[in-house]
Image (cartoon, rainbow, N blue to C red):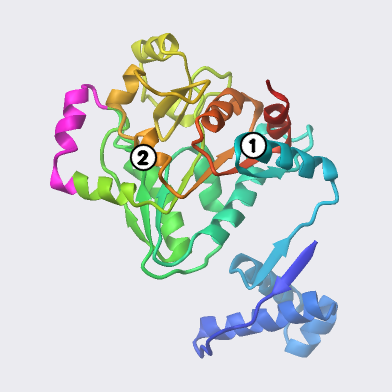
Amino acid sequence: MHKCAKGAAVEDYSAEGRRTRQALRAAQLYYVQDQTMESIARELAVSRSSVSRLLSFARDTGIVEINVSAPDQHVGDIERRLGERYSVRAHVVPTPDTLSDVERLERVGMNAARLVGEFVESHMTVGVAWGSTMSVVSKHLVSRPTRHSEIVQMNGAGNTQSTGIEYSSDILQRFGQAFGARVQQFPVPAFFDDPSTREALWRERSIRRLLELQSRMDLAIFGVGTPFSEVPSHVYIGGFLGPNDYRSLKADHAVGDVATVFFRADGSSTNIALNARSSGPRLATLKRVPRRLCVASGAQKFAGVRGALEGSLVTDLVVDEALARRLAESR
């Protein structure tokens, strides 16, 4: 495990600035000079509990970055095999079989959030799809302000029961706050009742502006939905689809979706009827995004993630170890 305490770039005499300088000093003493918390408390003239809080603040704000170099060659081998097979940068999160689905997702989300912090830079347009996985990722983001960056919602979240604004907004706002970025919401339904309604709305200038932003995304961050798994994704339990929709997806052999756009096991999406009503970006549009980070956890995601990989929708993949192993060994 390697911990790095970074230096402060600009002198700040505010209360927050004083706390940051104190946290930096505590981190340097603890991680670099290997001093005990008791000795740090004496040097800083604070209590031991205050030192603990300063070190937590240093980790939460990015003063301290923690990198884990795993000696497990098996994980590295899986990452290599996935990379060679699907031309992706794979990041496999070690997860013992004793973990629950919730604990597994938390670990994957934390690792994905760290990668997002490395990928997002100033002057970037970042697309974010809403969903259970993205909600977890958003809660683990570390503050790292950028300049002139935008977070754009990739697909609508409304349905017959809710506008979906509150749920999707929470996710987007966490991304915006973490990177000091402007948030661009997409206030449309997840699925339209009629494809012609979508076509008409897509001609509106206010919507065209958001579609233009989506077309210029530098980074897209998303999970994968799976319509027929035992543990369904958020879009399949939130009132977005009806019985006829499921029959249609089954008839079209859909195995998963990215931002509510569906695809088959081979990654194709042509003539999947429900896509004509979806508010998500066409998969051809998504594939033009330079970096496409897919985050997935749990065996129930296997068919969907493999379809996304077969369709070349992913450039960077974060998955738990069991799912990664199954993907690497599948034929």
Real-space CA distance between mark 1 and mark 2, rounded to the nearest whole angstrom: 32 Å
- Tell me the amino acid under the disc marked 1: Val
Residue labelled with disc 2: 285
Q: Residues within 10 Å of mark 2 (few under 14, many from 20)?
A: few
Q: Nearer the viewer, residue 133 or 209?
A: 209
Q: Which residue is mark 1?
A: 102
- Per the rendering, the mark at residue 242 is none
Where disc 2 sits, the SS reads: helix
Q: Mark 1: which secondary structure?
A: helix
Give above or below for 90 relative to 301.
below
Span of residues in magenta = 192-206
Type of residue at label 2?
Answer: Thr
Q: Residue at x 64, y 31 (%)?
A: 298
Q: Which sits in the foreground, 148 or 308? A: 308
Which residue occupies 54% across, 55% down?
A: 116
Q: Which one is closest to the eye, mark 1 or mark 2?
A: 2
Q: Is residue 34 magenta?
A: no
Q: Residue at x 44, y 69 (%)?
A: 146
